[in-house]
Image: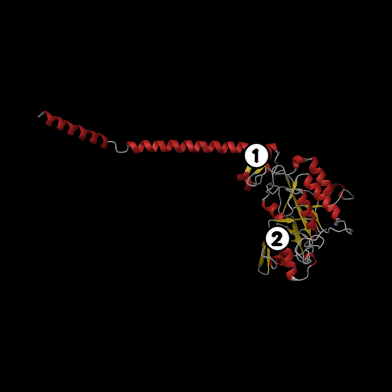
Amino acid sequence: MGLLRVSRVGVVVVAASTVLAGCMPGQGEESQSKLDAKVAAAKASAAAAGKAALLKAKMAAAAKVRANELGEIPVLMYHRVVEKPTTQDDRTPQQFRAELERLAKEDYVPITAAEYVSGRIDIPAGRHPVVLTFDDSSPSQFDLDGMGVPKPGTAVAILQNVARSHPGFRPVATFYVTRDMFGKATPEEQTQMLAWLRDNGFDIGNHTRDHKNLRGKPEKEVNAEIVAGHELITKLINTNPVTLALPYGNQPNHSDWALKGASGGVSYNYGGVFLAGYTPALSPFNKKFDPLGIPRIRSMDKIGDCVKFCSTAWLDWLKANSDERYTSDGDVKTVAFPKFKTPFVLKRYTDRVLAY
């Protein structure tokens, strides 16, 4: 009987344990859920702390180089590069090289007009962008020898040579072409020229086909002139120009006609329209940036009218007023500047702001 009772008690005890365990089916799951929540919270906290630390480090780095990506950018305008200048727009190869050497020594890095208007200014921290533009597609700007190498003395050859001597100084520029097309007469030769420029990082912009003054012309004629220049490029290479340089710097009666329009079933919609000269240009991130009329600076020494308003004078001014100049933080994904400049940032870039 004792054994039986023990056995029965044992049975009862086991059953009771089973019943107790069965009374709390979610207890283990609840504990695991709480544990998972704590782990997730810890991870989120660590991620937030890491993000805050990274932001603090970026702000410190931007402050160290005095980044100002709302600052001014020199857009330099060149025409012919010849040994014997005959117009006020001509520069000798020696003068052109000297200006490039100065830009390199003062920490400028060339970018294209397309990169500028789109905000893709990807240059090292502490450096300053400069846009080199060439109008009218003169043979003195660019020509190739029989092996497809830029001929010595041309602007492209000089630019490449200076870049080799100054690592980080990008050999890129924007060429605003017309029907002269570097003196090449056949479509095959013209295609060679444009394809080489494109494939070597250069930018090709519209300067209209016939270089006609657009001021005072009706909208239909303005559109036709711009489309003719647009197709001059697209029929030779499969690349759409991103910007337009106005012939003589003259805007049409309505400046927006130059930015967007159509003719003969062909449309254009540019990121920016460039004038002929005068002052440095605003940052594309600055709310005062006007894509309808971007100023350029004529390359020239401080003589005559150029004492104040050409490249030597403006580069002197930017050097003396360095806080007004665009200085990169080295991160193309951010727009860095001193915090007090925040009211000047263009609204669509607010998600990229790094104000220190």
Q: Position of residue 48 (x, y in %)?
A: 53, 37
Splitting the image into 4 quarters, where does residue 67 fall? top right
Q: Nearer the viewer, residue 232 or 274?
A: 232
275 lies left or right of 91 = left
Question: Which residue is pictured at 52% across the width and 38% down the height?
Answer: 47
Question: Which residue is pictured at 62% across the width and 45% down the height?
Answer: 352
- SS at mark 1? strand
The span from disc 2 to disc 1 (Cα, nearest Å) is 36 Å
Q: Nearer the viewer, residue 217 or 70?
A: 70
Whether 180 is drawn above or below 336: the answer is: below
Question: Which residue is pictured at 63% across the width and 39% down the height?
Answer: 58
Q: Which residue is mark 2?
A: 198
Q: Give the residue type that dot 1 points to.
A: Ala
The local crowd at label 2, few if under 14, some if 14 to 19, many if 20 or more residues have their Cα within 10 Å, is some
Quarter in which the N terminus is drawn? top left
Q: Position of residue 307 (x, y in %)?
A: 87, 47
Quarter in which the C terminus is drawn? top right
Whether 81 is drawn above or below 329: the answer is: below
Q: Nearer the viewer, residue 3 or 18?
A: 3
